[in-house]
Amino acid sequence: MKKPIYLDYASTTPTDPLVVQAMTPFFFESFGNASSPHSIGQKARKALEDSRAVLANFIGAKPSEIVFTSGASEGNNQAILTLALSLFGKGRHVIISAIEHHSVLECAKRLGKLGFQVDLVKPQPDGIVDSASMIQLIREDTILIALHHANNEIGVIQPVEEIGVVARQKGICFLVDATQTVGHIPVDVKKISCDLLSLSAHKFYGPQGVGALYAREGIHLEPRLYGGDQETGRRAGTQNLPGIVGLGQAIELCQKKMEKEAREQAALRDYMIEFVLTNIKGSSLNGHRQMRLPNNAHFSFEKINGEELVTALDMAGIAISQGSACKWGTLEPSHALKALGLSDELALGSLRVSIGRWTSKEDVDCFLEQLKSVIEKLRK
Ligand code: PMP
């Protein structure tokens, strides 16, 4: 059977074989617990700290500012819930974009139940959250602002630097979910002026189930998991050593490849957008044409049910999704697309194409041909 064409890199990327190679010894000869005093444990500790240094350097942080987690969901939960509780006395107002990932939105909902006031800021129709609209909501008692670096569905890149400058001036904690950008476009915590930043290794060719939370020096980050002193008391539990080694190796590969990959993927993305908009009637692009991730194109099609489209494409050998894998099967239109002002019909008739390291021009051509014919069939 022919291998499926994978166009769902935004949900997860395949692990790079070089990452798997780097991880493998840490299941066998170097399997130690990084907190053990003996030489096997210390070797594990060294590998862990090497990965921390590699990641820190890549995002412009200090190694001591990196807390390894199980991924961005955990990072976002820790950042929002522990921070809000520790700043409870200072203020109870939080500003969050309405198109954040559910791991941010659900935490905000939780804060609402705990007595916080949460302002959700809708994006403009092009998917960009207007920084001035966010800034004007700041109050004396605002303790946290959250804006993701790029959206996981429509791939729009947000003006995080503009928010960062103001948040820093006013001493408000600023959380940036950079899950979709790390390894794809430059991410520098100093340029963004964020206090907290979350990421997941499986979005940049590392393994699933491992990630990190950057917490700027001076930010008091409470643990969400209590127990041992791992991660300097900020996250209890034996670290996922092979995963963390994999994360470090994935970052090293991105360091070498990111610029070229972004350029090539952006060219393929633009080619796809051009093709779809010219050759498929009733199609539209969701999100800003240029201010988007190099590997993301997100479309809506009139008179198409997105779930049927995804299933038909799957049967044609193309693995692709409508948007967030975390909410697949809910039959609800995506909160992000609704926030852009799309009708239910267009929000439900959407498709996210996310390409990556192993997507070829042939893959894209084959997909476009299938897409056109599947849409024609479904509309009949
Ligand atoms: N934030 C964003 C923007 C994401 O795309 C994702 C993954 N879809 C997450 C957070 C959560 O990451 P994970 O599932 O690895 O915890």
Image (tube, helix red, strand yellow):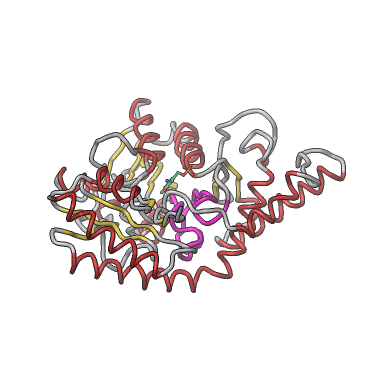
Residue that protrudes farthest toward the front in the picture: 1
Q: How many marks?
A: 0
Name the spot of residue 295 as percent of width and height, x first: 39, 63
Image quadrant of ligand 1 equals top left
| Residue 211 on the magenta span | no
Q: Would residue 338 be visible to someone looking at this image?
A: no
Q: Is 222 on the left-hand or right-hand side of 362? A: right
Quarter of the image for residue 50 reads: bottom right
| Residue 180 on the magenta span | yes
Q: Would residue 200 be visible to someone looking at this image?
A: yes
Stretch in magenta: 177-206
Name the spot of residue 291 as percent of width and height, x first: 32, 65
Q: Is 303 on the left-hand or right-hand side of 111? A: left
Q: Nearer the viewer, residue 202 or 136?
A: 202
Identify the residue at image location x=17%, y=59%.
Answer: 283
Name the spot of residue 341 as percent of width and height, x first: 17, 49
Q: Nearer the viewer, residue 168 or 375?
A: 375
